[in-house]
Image (tube, coloured by chain):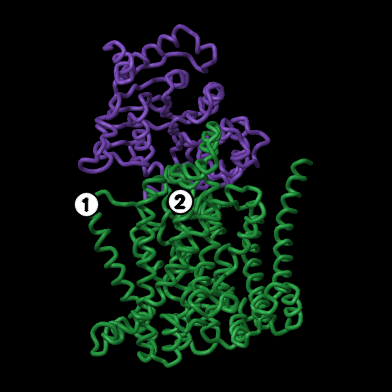
Chain colours: A green, B purple
Amino acid sequence: MIRQQVLLTEQMRTYAGFASLLIAWELLARFAFGQLYILSPPTAIVMRIIEDLPLYTRALGATVSEALLGFVLGNLAAIVLAVLVVTIPPIERLAQAIALVVFCLPLVATGPILRVIYGPGWGPQITLAALSVYYTTFVPLVVGLRAVPPSWLDLIASYGRGRLTAMTVVRARACLPYLIASLKIAAPAAFLGAIVGEFTGADRGIGVLSIQAMRSLDVDGTWALATIASAVAIIGYALVGWAGQLLSIGAPPSLLVSPASKAPKVLWKKLFMAVAAPILSCVVILLLWQVFMDGLELSRFFAKRPGDVWAYLVAGSQAAAHRSELFAALRETMGTTVLGYLAGLGLGAVLAAVFCMLPAVEKIASPVAIALRSIPIVATAPLLVLVLGRGQLGMLGIVAIMIFFPTLVSCLHGLRQTPGQVIDYFDSYQAPPLTQLFLARVPAMLPSLFAAARMAVPMAVLAATVAEWLATGTGIGNLMALTSSTSNYNMLWSCVTILTLVSVAGYALVAMLERRVLSHFAPEQVI
Amino acid sequence: MTDKRIDQTPVSEIGPPKVEAWAVNKVFGYGDASVQAVSDVELTLEPGTTTALVGPSGCGKSTLLRMVAGLETPTSGAIRIGGEEPHLVARKGRLSVAFQDPSLLPWRTAASNVALARRLAGLPKDPEKVQRLLSLVGLDGFENKRPAELSGGMRQRCAIARCLATDARLLLLDEPFGAVDEMTRRRLNLELPRVWEGQGTTTLLVTHSVTEAVLLSDRVIVMSHRPARVSADIAIDIERPRRASHLTSPKFLELVTQINAALGIVDEPEDDDSRLEAQA
């Protein structure tokens, strides 16, 4: 009885949290920001949704269908590749490298290229949806398929059975908690991919309507569409979670292990891994690019090959001019992106620590944060542009918000990982809360913070380029928008290549920092 | 082709096998980082007997058992089970291993964990046998419980039932009671051997409990610290079935003392404290 009552009050607190947020919003919109045309009160949003229901339903139907197809295809690809990697370990490094590069492709620029390749229709949206779920399923799944106690594998081997039996009897079931956790994240991500596809030129869908509403300064409409997008994303997230509960699949023990494989002990192997393996990966990726384009017999006019980009940026007579144009735009983008990235990361970590110090606040704020985390922020970019303005500050805000929520949720999770015994130990000395925070909880949070920081790199680039594409008219995002509308495909492909390289380099930099820091604070997380 | 014919021989018609090991060495790693885990072990397990391997922890006795199970390959030397190579015997489902960790699959019920052994060994389903084994180890009424709902001792008994589900004539028990508390362990020591005694199996038991070794086996082999070598080979001539009363019999205590002495000789490093005190 008592337990039920406690649960009830906790639930009520959560509801109270949401309700007070809504009321504050309504009041702010009605009285404080009424004249600014940026904030719509919840009641006006609901009215608008009811008014335009048929239009929104049609658009939503298109976007959800694209997202669903992309979700299925992207996850299937991830599952197949993860199973292959675990069954045939030598291909892992290459597969990881290719997966990372695909993850780092700037979706905004990939959209228009896919548009000319596919022609009109849903192709680009579906592909982008698949691309945006692929990596976040692949990486945890490889961890999950591996996270099997060695004695289970010994059991299989003691009956003389091999890898295939281990896969079907043990690994396939043992990885399910990891798979469900990834699919939960994948549901909103697929929706995001589909919407980004729509931003870059489609004839119907929520993304198309959002841009129209933003451009015509239709505040209520923009808010209504962002609300619909958020609701659908949260519902997708919840549906997958619910399916997992139905199949009684719990949460995975930990999703933090960095994807790098075992470090070799022999010197020449170390050298090979450090130097030759990345080069080999690059060669294979370039080869795949070339073969893919040639194999599909795509026109050289819009489907550029590695050689074209090389000629355009390095070997050609105009290369220096092209380079300076591209890098000037890149510099413009990078300043704001890095600032936004650090701001989002820092805010997320600091707020998580604050929540941790104030458990009463955490109880209310944590569910709100988790709900907001599942909103694909980029899908609501038109709204953020409307609210934050078209300048660099707006772009900084979009990048920071994009990164803030996943970081906050991840750090809250990490802070809860502090072993109870350690807390008891500090309590036994009556250690003040701040001492406890810095000496016990923050070190336990670091693996989660770095996991979030790694994944946030391509996210930051995506958010920045979307903001530039839609609103600011600056930087590499704008350059890509211009070149795609003027069919300057050489420059567009060059932008894609350079942005991908920048993302991969940023990811590698964070991963390197992660290994440095974790080998000091959490050596068990460094494989 | 001949292999296939042998495969179809019902396991129950095959007697308990003889296990032989000649000059077995096992080295892990390469170069400077290499560790010699087992050194020149010669061993013969007579059909139908139970042999215990005891020795300090990390002495390589588990490695030896794993090589007999076909889970590791000797660096040099050879092991034969009834004249065949271990991994071939394993592939025919004719040996069963019980691990220190019961390694039950958490998403399967007790009954389906036991049934899994038959599936892995390529044997037809036999729900009645599974049920019989579960009651034999005292898990009546727990067939449909998952491992998380069982106590540590119950999980261990479930693992033993699984180990017996294939009628294998060679049981390899790697500290099967290592993870349960002392009281449960003693009870399992007395109860479980009755399950496999009398059905004719060759059994190899790895343990670091001297009492358990004497209580369960016909012969105790004491191994020295790394690399593992056979340092004593002691016959246990106490009548079966063994009972709790044996634990306090003079014969039993004498054997325990004898084995402890054999272990004490190789256990010198543990006396470091007293030696330091003596020096002070």
Determine crowd level at label 2: few under 14, some 14-19, many 20+ residues with C-alpha closer than 10 A: many
Residue B37 appears at what percent x and percent y?
29, 34
Q: Amino acid at mark 1?
A: Leu
Residue A267, numbered label: 1
Name the one closer to the observer, B44 or A504: A504
Image position of A187 with respect to B190: above or below = below
Image position of A6 with respect to A392: above or below = above
What residue is shown at x 46% (from left), y 36% (from top)?
B99
Have a look at marks 2 and 1 and say if they share a chain. yes
Quadrant of residue A504 within the rendered picture: bottom left
What residue did someone put label 2 on? A446
Name the one closer to the observer, A83 or A519: A519
Chain letter behind tag 2? A
What residue is shown at x 25% (from left), y 82% (from top)?
A314
SS at badge 2: helix
What distance separates the C-alpha of mark 2 from that of mark 1?
30 Å
The mark tally for this picture is 2
Residue A440 appears at what percent x and percent y?
49, 42
Residue A28 appears at what percent x and percent y?
70, 70
What residue is shown at x 77% (from left), y 41% (from top)?
A2
